[in-house]
Image: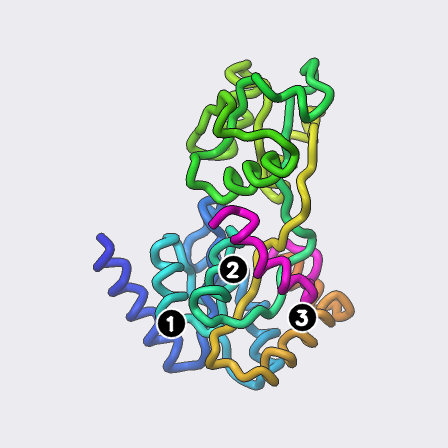
Amino acid sequence: MKKIWMAALLLQAAGAYAQGLMMGVSEGTSGGLDHAQVIIKYQGLADVIGRAIKQKVNVVFIREFAQLEEGLKSSRFDFVIARPSDYPARGIRDYRYQFVASAKPDGQCFIVVPKDSPIKTLAEIKGKRIALPEEVAYMTKFCKAELRDKGIDLNKENVRYVREQGAVAMYLTNNFAEAGGLASYSGVAKKWEQDGNRVLHKSVAQPYFPLIASRKIKPAEVEAIKKALVAMPDNEADQAVLKTVGIQAFDITTEQRLRDLLKWLGN
């Protein structure tokens, strides 16, 4: 199976390189789009980047995390915009990619409880059943790091690991757990609040959906791209691009926080 998707990626890459640079896009496990839909969603952003450096930039959909890691390791992608954020962070730390920007707003871990929960403070989740996505998931590591900093060691707590964030909400609403962790940017977290449920605690903010560039992109080109991204909210056409991608704007000031992210997560 790995050989099949690698072969498909190589063919896809060959076509992209024949026409220009390549921007890999990963929406993580929360993305439900196919390749054609991803191109429609992100080609506008690729065009903004391309105009800034006077080159054609094509969108390539990255479905699997292994594919994303391999593409970063081999510098196959000229640009990568990806969530979860630990992959771009590793791209910078381990594979010599350059920071370009991250999306606004930042990402957070929300510790949530049902609307009728008697729990009022974060400290009260100690000894309770806590639902989190699977143990290897980025947001689980994010929530663990936040709670560690708040004096709660989840290795000593009654944690129920579930397949995905939707299952976290299901555990809470069906009384299989008293508290849970959700990504602030997830549809599950948004619906949780819309339904009148409570966010007990919001974590420290960390860079969300970072955009990085391979070392093949010249520093002057990276600076031109940053300038173009920052200016996007001032242009009506680019505002539509931001809306299509699903973010408010780009932030070019978060490089150090992204570089510090892996250490904070314990990676």
Residue that appears at 63% across and 48% down: 107
Q: Nearer the viewer, residue 163 or 188?
A: 163
Q: Residues within 10 Å of mark 3 (few under 14, many from 20)?
A: many
* In the displayed structure image, the side of residue 8 where residue 86 appears, left or right: right
Q: Residues within 10 Å of mark 2 (few under 14, many from 20)?
A: many
Residue that appears at 32% across and 65% down: 9
- Tag shown at residue 89: 2
Q: Nearer the viewer, residue 140 or 14?
A: 140
Q: Is residue 173 visible?
A: no
**Image quadrant where residue 238 sits:** bottom right
Residue type, numbered disc 3: Leu
Residue type, numbered disc 2: Ala
Q: Is residue 248 a member of the stretch shown in magenta? A: yes
- Tag shown at residue 207: none
Viewer-side label of 1, 2: 2
* Residue at numbered disc 3: 229
Nearer-N-terminus badge (2/3)? 2
Nearer-N-terminus badge (1/2)? 1
Element type at mark 1 = loop
Q: Position of residue 64 (x, y in %)?
A: 37, 53
* Residue at numbered disc 1: 76
Mark 1 near mark 2, Cβ–Cβ under 8 Å?
no
